Image (cartoon, rainbow, N blue to C red):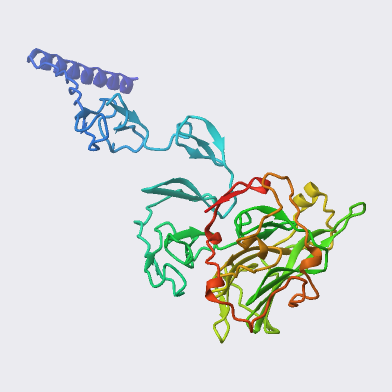
Amino acid sequence: MKMLGVKTLLLVLILSVMLASMVTEAASGNKVKRVKPRKPVKPVQELLTCKSRRSKCFMKRIKCPVECPKVKPKNPKDKACFLDCYSPKCEAVCKSRKPNCNGPGAACYDPRFIGGDGIVFYFHGKSNEHFTLISDSDLQINAPASGNKVKRVKPPKPVKPVQEILTCKSRKSKCFKKRITCPIECPKVKPKNPKDKACFLDCYSPKCEAVCKSRKPNCNGPGAACYDPRFIGGDGIVFYFHGRSNEHFSLISDSNLQINARFIGLRPEGRTRDYTWIQALGLKFGHHDFTLEATRTEKWDGNADHLKLSHDGMELIIPEGDSSEWNSTQGDIQVERTSTTNSLTITIPNLAEIFVNVIPVSEEDSKIHNYQIPLNDSFAHLEVQFRFFGLSSNVEGILGRTYRPDFENPAKPGVAMPVIGGDDKYKTSSLLATDCALCVFSPDNIKDEDDSLMMEYGMLECQGGGDGIACKK
């Protein structure tokens, strides 16, 4: 009990001393200091200006809002100051530095676009392929459809193409030895892209100018023989010549040039005539001959070549590929591919130029015209366009007679399907025969130059289609 009393006494003593010390400190006059909070520092608001003279805000000094005083804030989550130089308001606004997938110009998700007009649309494309998002004269933006980021591609500065210079080597041409520059739209005679138009100089045109022209036959131009088969004569008038399936007819017969055609076709039950197409051409010039034919195929494949050629009885193979060509050793004929497969240009100097394309009879055409094409034959045939140089005034043939100066075409413009006969007059016994009733091919009989027509038909301007084609010089 005595020990407990002593401890209690000591505790009371310690508390008394502490209390006395506190009273003494308060009595000394020291005050408790009150700490004032720091005044907030006003952020420096950056000034922006527009340097484009096309902007209504050109050289105006625009202050950033206090909510987003910096163009590049330190905290990436903070909004940044943004000045739209092409806005009529000329004011800076706060904007996230990440894409807004719900704003105009957005391309997000699968992928969902929001156009400049504010309308939402989707474009899926195909995986691992590339598509153009923006294409302008000074800006190209492509995107691969593979989840990668959109890459901005700066287009290379356009290089002015070298325009080739052409000349005519024929003394009969009004353009003989003149140097003619190709147009800037088609600077090359043999463009790398087979779909591009080529530079072409018509040595028998009075204009003596180079023009842009497709390297494939124009079925709406003079000298054309296409479809079932539909011809456009040297006079620009459209006519049809049906012939008969598996028979041969002379298209051109002149003293130094013979061109025959083999027709293929079929006759559905109930019809009185064959549907026909030109399947092969046989050419005789001087003492040489040349043949080309569309080979039969069950299913059409545009990537496979369906042309078979021969020269003087020997099979001719020209490697596949655009601009691949062959020249005879005598230099009297040139054959050039105008696409990787199925298209050719044949040139016989000073006589003819022939543009050829192989196509099938399509299912659509078969249904429209009720051809009733069988499943085991695509009826591959030729589309052809001829240009002739210096035919005589006595030229014959289904097409040749339309180049005669005294020819009066019985086919009247505007008639739905003007058909011209002549089966009995122009039928030949084979593809290279010259034995039709009106054939005049005789290479040993050299005609006078005065009897040669300087054909201007090659550059007739034709417009329209079907029976509505009109041509003028």
| Closer to the camera in the image, 422 or 101 | 422
Q: Left or right: where does residue 258 sit relative to residue 36?
A: right
- Percent x, y for residue 275? 81, 57
Q: Left or right: where does residue 102 sit relative to residue 229?
A: left
Q: With respect to residue 471, does 197 lie above or below?
A: below
Residue drawn at (69%, 48%), measured in percent from left and top?
412
| Closer to the camera in the image, 90 or 304 | 304
Q: With respect to residue 56, does 157 lie above or below?
A: below
Farthest residue to the right: give it: 270
Q: With respect to residue 276, does 143 lie above or below?
A: above
- Percent x, y for residue 28? 7, 15
Residue drawn at (41%, 49%), measured in percent from left and top?
140
Quadrant placement of the N terminus? top left
Farthest residue to the left: give it: 28
Farthest residue to the bottom: give it: 329
* Figure label count: 0
- Percent x, y for residue 22? 16, 17
User: Does the image show residue 298?
Assistant: no
| Closer to the camera in the image, 75 or 107 | 107
User: Does the image show residue 428?
Assistant: yes
Picture quadrant of residue 282: bottom right
- Percent x, y for residue 249? 76, 68
| Closer to the camera in the image, 220 or 208 | 208
Picture quadrant of residue 398: bottom right
Residue drawn at (74%, 77%), measured in percent from left and top?
434
Q: With respect to residue 131, does 40 lie above or below?
A: above
Q: Left or right: where does residue 36 sit relative to residue 322?
A: left
